């Protein structure tokens, strides 16, 4: 995802919208957690999946280096929190919806600190949050839920 992130950032920078690159692609970076939770249905699966995914990204030469591990832990925590709100009992649309919301809130909060978004105007922050929410919904909600449903129907998880 790093080359795609760099490309999107380069395209958005001339029009002053570079921070939207991360918001647009956020769902790609956070999909391992919800997918692991939907498939394995065990507390901690999302955190481990995000952390191991971050470790692989770092070892492959990701542009953020070891900081990727911290992001992986934060993203995984966001995924876990959504399913924890349902007591790890709902692996349906309610569980994944809670995960989408908590993942977006937790990761957006982290990005506010890490990227120092405090200087942005209120409406810019609202727009970035909404774009992040849409990205997480599509790529960390809809896509993992669809994959898990296909795996269930194929009986590969039995």
Image (cartoon, helix red, strand yellow):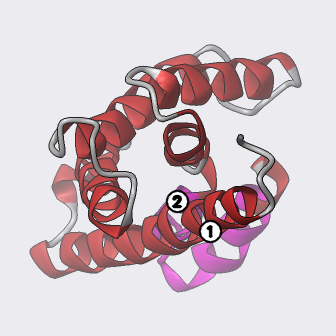
Which mark, residue 132? none
Q: CA distance from mark 1 to mark 2?
A: 6 Å
Q: Nearer the viewer, residue 152 or 138?
A: 152
- Residue nearest the observer in this picture, 158 or 101: 158
What is the secondary structure assignment of the residue under circle 2?
Answer: helix
> Looking at the image, is 29 positioned above or below residue 27?
above
Q: Position of residue 65 (x, y in %)?
A: 68, 20
Residue 71 visible to an observer of this rendering: no
Q: Mark 2 sits on what residue? A: 140
| Identity of the residue drawn at 71% across and 78% down | 11
- At label 2, counting other C-alpha atoms closer than 10 Å, the crowd grade (few under 14, some 14-19, many 20 or more) is many
What predominant SS class does the magenta segment belong to? Answer: helix
The outermost residue toward the left is 122
Q: Which residues are magenta?
A: 5-27
Where residue 58 appears, as percent x and y from the top left, is 75, 21
Which residue of the protein is positioned furthest toward the bottom in this rendering?
Answer: 15
Contact between marks 1 and 2 (CB within 8 A): the answer is yes
How far from the left and from the top, in percent, is residue 25?
Answer: 59, 63
At 80% from the left edge and 61% from the top edge, which residue is drawn? Answer: 154
Q: Is residue 80 visible?
A: yes
Residue lying farthest right?
60
Q: Quadrant of residue 27?
A: bottom right
Q: Is residue 23 magenta?
A: yes
Please say if 132 is above or below 68.
below
User: Residue at 22% across / 64% down in the picture?
Assistant: 120
The quadrant holding residue 150 is bottom right
Relative vertical location of residue 113 with respect to residue 94 in this rendering, above or below = above
Using residue 12 as the reference point, say whether residue 43 is left or right of it.
left
Which residue is under mark 1?
A: 143
Q: Estimate how packed mark 1 is, as few (under 14), some (14 to 19) or many (20 or more) residues with alpha carbons within 10 Å.
A: some
């Amino acid at each position: 995802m790093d080359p795609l992130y760099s490309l999107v950032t380069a395209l958005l920078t001339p029009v002053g919208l570079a921070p939207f690159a991360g918001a647009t692609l956020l769902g790609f970076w956070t999909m391992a957690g919800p997918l692991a939770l939907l498939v394995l249905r065990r507390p901690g699966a999302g955190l481990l999946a995000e952390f191991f995914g971050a470790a692989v990204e770092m070892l492959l030469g990701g542009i953020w280096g070891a900081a990727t591990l911290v992001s992986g832990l934060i993203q995984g925590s966001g995924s876990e929190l959504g399913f924890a709100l349902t007591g790890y009992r709902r692996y349906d649309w309610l569980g994944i919806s809670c995960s989408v919301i908590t993942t977006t809130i937790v990761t957006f909060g982290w990005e506010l600190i890490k990227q120092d978004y405090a200087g942005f105007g209120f409406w810019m922050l609202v727009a970035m949050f909404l774009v992040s929410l849409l990205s997480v919904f599509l790529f960390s909600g809809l896509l993992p839920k669809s994959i898990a449903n296909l795996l269930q129907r194929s009986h590969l998880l039995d």
